[in-house]
Image (cartoon, rainbow, N blue to C red):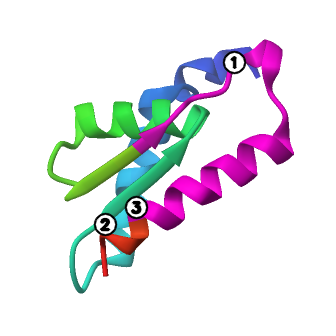
Amino acid sequence: AAQHVEYFGLSSIARDVNEMVSALGSKGANFALADSFGALVVQRTQSLFPALFDRVIMSSFTAPDRFDLFETAFAYESVVRRVLQYCE
């Protein structure tokens, strides 16, 4: 496994995201909504493929020593619902 370590990392994941989004195509704008580690992935994806997403929302508001899945999920859902109201 150690011999393949160069294939793992944010840049590798970003290339995978680019391939998936490109393969799926789009009938409109491409949006990325990311939380926690996903925000790091989207940030790297944006740096490597700046034209991939038309809009990006990144949220990383939890600290590792205070992470609570349910509190985070409910807070995140509340924010997402407010943001989506403006997208209609």
Indicate the amino acid at tag 2: Ser
Q: Amino acid at mark 1?
A: Ala
Of 41 and 22, the residue lying toward us: 41
Please provide percent x and percent y for residue 76.
Answer: 62, 50
Q: In the image shown, does 38 or 20 lie closer to the viewer?
A: 38
Q: Which residue is mark 1?
A: 63
Residue contact between numbered discs 2 and 3, judged by CB atoms under 8 Å: no
Task: Nearest to the eye among marks 2 and 3: give it.
Answer: 3
The mark tally for this picture is 3
Viewer can see residue 53:
no
Is most of the magenta stretch helix, strand or loop?
helix
User: Could you tell which of marks 1 and 3 lies nearer the N-terminus?
Assistant: 1
| Residue picked out by circle 3 | 83
Look at the image and say whether residue 21 sits in the magenta stretch. no
Q: Position of residue 75 (x, y in %)?
A: 66, 48
> How much space separates mark 1 and mark 2, taking CA atoms?
33 Å
